[in-house]
């Protein structure tokens, strides 16, 4: 038995599944089953799947680039604004230290983002592990809460007392939550609160970031 054998004798061309049977001493019967149409359809299906995969890859790359541009634009915008404010304060003889603190924070944020991108580009997909989602969120909130200046938006945290277990990578989750929280803090008016909560709905865990600001800058 041979599958997909190509055959041509000038009269018949195509792909055939070939079956050979012994019918008696010194005699063999050969059966040709034409599978040309089936092979053609299979080839078209594989080509369509390849095109769909390529389109999905391009779309994912587009979303990644848009998200990266947004993540970089936010700290650059803050750097520009606070640098100008510090220069203006220096010219007017005022203390520019608060603005310098904001500039330093945004530089650290850009540095962390670039280091994340470099790590993502050179390491394989992170292995999953058992992660306490509440602990990750509390650690991120504590870190960003300590780095805010006194006039910044405070963080209100709500997490269950018992651990919320999920499968994932703690470092990757922490970086994602940090970026979201930084956006919320940057665009929440002074004196108002950013709320961060962890909850469980059925077999799903949910993390919410609520603020009164608009973290998406107009184009």
Image (cartoon, rainbow, N blue to C red):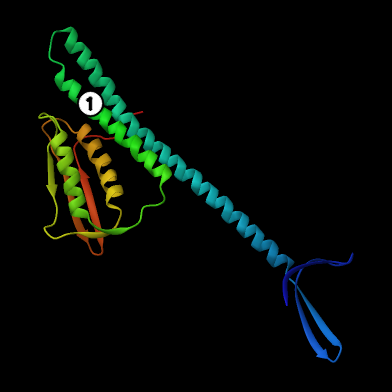
From the viewer's perspective, is 67 left or right of 51? left
Q: Name the residue under label 1.
A: 104
Find residue 101 and report its horizontal and vertical position in percent: 18, 25
Q: Residue at x 49, y 48 (%)?
A: 56
Q: Can residue 217 be seen in this view?
A: no
Q: Within the image, what quadrant is residue 76 found in?
A: top left
Q: Which of 42 and 95 is in front in this view?
A: 95
Q: Which of 18 and 211 is in front in this view?
A: 18
Given the current orientation, which residue lies at the most extreme right position?
A: 10
Relative vertical location of residue 15 with respect to residue 18 in this rendering, above or below: above
Q: Residue at x 88, y 67 (%)?
A: 9
Relative vertical location of residue 159 with respect to residue 30 in this rendering, above or below: above
Q: Which residue is drawn at 20% across and 48% down?
A: 137
Q: Within the image, what quadrant is residue 131 found in?
A: bottom left
Q: How many labels does the image show?
A: 1
Q: Nearer the viewer, residue 5 or 33?
A: 5
From the viewer's perspective, is 42 left or right of 153? right
Q: Residue at x 73, y 78 (%)?
A: 1
Given the current orientation, which residue lies at the most extreme bottom position?
A: 24
Q: Can residue 57 be seen in this view?
A: yes
Find residue 116 and report its horizontal and vertical position in percent: 34, 40
Q: State the SS at label 1.
A: helix
From the viewer's perspective, is 203 left or right of 1? left
Which quarter of the rendered picture does the C terminus lie within? top left
Find residue 79 and report its horizontal and vertical position in percent: 27, 23
Find residue 90 and report its horizontal and vertical position in percent: 18, 10
Q: How crowded is mark 1: few (under 14 residues within 10 Å), some or many (20 or more)?
A: few
């Amino acid at each position: 038995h041979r599958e997909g054998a190509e055959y041509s004798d000038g009269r018949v061309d195509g792909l055939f599944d070939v079956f050979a049977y012994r019918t008696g001493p010194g005699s063999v019967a050969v059966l040709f089953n034409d599978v040309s149409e089936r092979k053609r359809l299979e080839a078209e299906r594989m080509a369509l799947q390849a095109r769909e995969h390529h389109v999905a890859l391009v779309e994912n790359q587009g979303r990644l680039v848009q998200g990266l541009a947004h993540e970089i634009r936010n700290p650059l915008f803050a750097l520009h604004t606070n640098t100008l404010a510090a220069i203006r304060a220096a010219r007017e003889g005022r203390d520019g230290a608060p603005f310098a603190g904001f500039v330093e924070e945004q530089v650290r944020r850009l540095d962390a983002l670039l280091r994340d991108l470099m790590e993502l580009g050179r390491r394989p997909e992170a292995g999953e592990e058992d992660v306490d989602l509440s602990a990750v969120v509390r650690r991120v909130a504590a870190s960003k809460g300590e780095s805010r200046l006194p006039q910044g938006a405070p963080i209100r945290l709500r997490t269950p007392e018992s651990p919320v277990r999920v499968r994932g990578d703690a470092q990757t989750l922490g970086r994602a939550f940090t970026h979201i929280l930084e956006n919320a803090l940057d665009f929440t008016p002074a004196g108002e609160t950013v709320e961060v909560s962890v909850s469980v709905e059925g077999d799903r865990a949910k993390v919410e970031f609520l603020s009164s600001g608009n973290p998406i800058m107009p184009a």
